[in-house]
Image: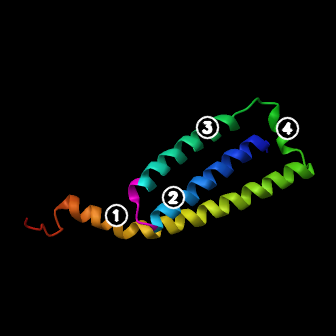
Amino acid sequence: MDPQLLSYYEAIERASVDMLTAARAGNWDEVVKLEGACVLLISHLKHAAQGPEDAGAVRDAPHPQVMELARAKSRIMQRILVNDAEIRHLAEPWLQDLDDTLSGRRAQSLH
């Protein structure tokens, strides 16, 4: 694994932490904004991972540095998944409220 690719994973993890912080604060507009940033980072990661054909042989070599980068990637991905699960859990009531509002099930207040 290329160290530059790892930097993309780290940036995605930072964005997921920021999303979780915003979700815990109930700032769903910020969560949506950060989700867009994550989509862009993931797109860049996919593009960067499509490097030259001969780079795959170097990445796949059982070199200690390559193995450490792979372990770091795995740890980062696990943290991203944990963050994502908590964000989804926090979003469930908000999404239900949104669904209720859009379907007209929410009681309308009179002003």
Residue with the mark numbered 4? 57
Q: Disc 1 vs disc 2: which is toward the camera?
A: 2
Marks 3 and 1, the one that precedes in the sequence: 3
Nearer to us in this view, 17 or 86: 17
Using the numbered discs, state the Cα–Cα distance from disc 1 to disc 4 in whole angstroms: 45 Å
Residue at 39% x, 68% y: name it.
Answer: 92
Between residues 74 and 13, which one lies in front from this camera angle?
13
Camera-near label (4 vs 2) is 2
Q: Which mark is residue 19?
A: 2
Q: Earlier in the sequence, mark 1 or mark 2?
A: 2
Q: Quadrant of the N terminus?
A: top right
* Label 2: which secondary element: helix
Of the image marks 4 and 2, the number of the one nearer the N terminus: 2
Cα distance in 3D space between marks 1 and 2: 16 Å
Which residue lies most toward the left here? Answer: 110
Residue 105 belongs to the span the image colors magenta:
no
Question: Which three-letter amino acid code belongs to the residue tagged 3?
Answer: His
Circle nearer the viewer, 1 or 4: 1
**Could you say which disc has been placed on residue 95 in the image?**
1
Q: Main secondary structure of the magenta part?
A: loop
As drawn, 98 above or below 107: above
Residue 26, magenta (yes or no): yes
Q: Residues within 10 Å of mark 3 (few under 14, many from 20)?
A: few
Q: Is residue 17 left or right of residue 29?
A: right
Q: Amino acid at mark 4?
A: Ala
SS at circle 4: helix
Residue in the picture at 46% in, 64% down:
23
Looking at marks 4 and 3 on the same chain, the residue that comes earlier in the sequence is marked by: 3
**Mark 2 or 3, closer to the camera:** 2
> What span is in magenta?
25-29
Q: Residues within 10 Å of mark 4 (few under 14, many from 20)?
A: few
Residue under pointer 3: 44
